[in-house]
Amino acid sequence: MDPGAVRDQIDRILRSPSFATKSQLRKLLQVLHNHPNSQATLTAEFVINELWPTEIKTKQAKDVATEMNRLRRAVKFYYDHEGKTDPVIIYFPKRAPSGDGHPETRWIDAMPRNGTGVPPSPAIAQVSNPRSWWQVNRRQDWGRTLLIVTFGLIGLVGYVSMRLLAKPEQPQSARLEGSQLVVTNGEGKELWRKAFPEGIGPDWYYAVYLHTPVWLADLEGNGHTSVLFIYSPAAHTAEPHSSTLICYSDRGDEKWRWTPGRELPELHGTPATYKIYALRVLKAAGKRPPRIVVSSAHDPWWPDQIALLDAKGALLSDYWHSGALPYLTLGDLDGDGREEIIATGMSEYDHRATLVVLDPDRVFGASTEAQPEFQIHGMGQAQERLRLLFPRSDLNRALFQYNEATDPVVDHGVIRLTVLECIKPRGCPIWYEFNKGIRLMAAYAGGDDFRSAHERFYRTGSNAHTLSAAEQAAFEKVRCLVGCNTEFVPVGNLVP
């Protein structure tokens, strides 16, 4: 392929709305593309150093494999939408043995668009003409033959017994193939798969909210990895369907299922259908075992449930928020060795982007709302550690009903997130950063996306104007509903 054409295609993907909020995946794509001549020597350790320079000791090859699977899904979503007619297809070969027995060494590749637009799959070595593990000479006497068969059966029984008693290979990654979930080990070898006759539906798995429908974790502390899968059946009727969280053992046996949400009188008879948008697992701390955190939003209305489950899928407690919180991360904000729950999305309090921080031991109640029609009753008062509302630009107020906070990241107690001022298509990001003391350290338009959209919209008409210094300063007015001593988050030495 022409290097210039490949470079142009990579730039086109990085600038696309699909990747507007995916900073980690943009960085990974750039790392892979920046090393076209050293694919054979590009190691997982190098990628870890590039993606997580401050977390090198805690990241492993499986984390790189997870990010690669996320990147594959994101690029597929891009080609299914904005990139349908792009002349170059970027794809990521499965790093498995090739047809000549040598390992596939390329991480990223490109090809001209063909008739189907589907990149080729790497060849998998096949074993042909296997030799039998024992041969019997016809002229042998029957006694000797019987002796061989007896010892063979004893060996076979012993082998099968050892296999049954041995710890199975542990899942390291998973992917979706049509209506099947495929679970693999660290080398990409398939361990087991599950088929879903009702289908998996539809492309919300590739939507911007759900980064991955699978989470792998040792939930019981016994060295066996459980596979958590967010399943949403294909819609065969006009009625929405709830998601289901399914837990499988490392052998692929189903352990339990959990369905989010509950009936709420505030929805006036609307069915209790909830979509799971975010899933994380809290690490064990002290006497506390690992716990599962799930954020689910009602479909199609506004209540959101953040649920805390134990390793057996039992509901421990839940927090209810008026407004979807589809983005979720965990992080130690105060350095006490315990993770907090950080969720972002939008709030019905004032139709603004929001950030909510919860103590895992105080996940209960419902958010307090200024507008009575959005108050969830009967849950008690929530005890958030922090609850912020982000300002809306004049562009957002003119075109959309709300803005949205996305992709929270915690780095040594520092919180970073993006607020999208454009909802359809998604973009116009404003980047925010808060230090450990929850002081605002950065609030600025990312790149030219927001400024360009603002200039296009306000180019003519009675309200024509350019983005003013006062409008930019308004981004610093982050309202604090819970967790501050002031109405607005204190402002530190802002990054210019």
Image (cartoon, grey):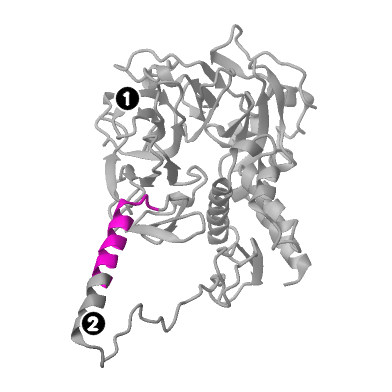
Which quadrant would residue 480 be assigned to in this image?
A: top right
Foreground residue among 251 and 388: 251
Q: Which residue is drawn at 32% across and 35% down?
A: 260
Foreground residue among 249 and 224: 224
Residue 161 is left or right of residue 409, and the answer is left
- Look at mark 2 in the image and give the residue it sits on: 145
Q: Does the stretch in magenta take in 164? A: yes
Range drawn in magenta: 152-168
Disc 2 is placed on an element classified as helix
Label number found at residue 316:
1
Q: Mark 1 vs mark 2: give the one in front.
A: 2
Disc 1 is placed on an element classified as strand
Residue 427 sits above or below residue 68 on the image: above
Kind of residue sitting beneath label 2:
Thr
Q: Which residue is drawn at 41% across and 53% down?
A: 169
Sequence-wise, the earlier of marks 1 and 2 is: 2
| Badge 2: residue crowd in 10 Å (few <14, some 14–19, many ≥20) | some
| Badge 1: residue crowd in 10 Å (few <14, some 14–19, many ≥20) | some
Which quadrant would residue 407 be assigned to in this image?
A: top right
Q: Is residue 459 visible?
A: no
Residue 268 is left or right of residue 77, and the answer is left
Kind of residue sitting beneath label 1:
Leu
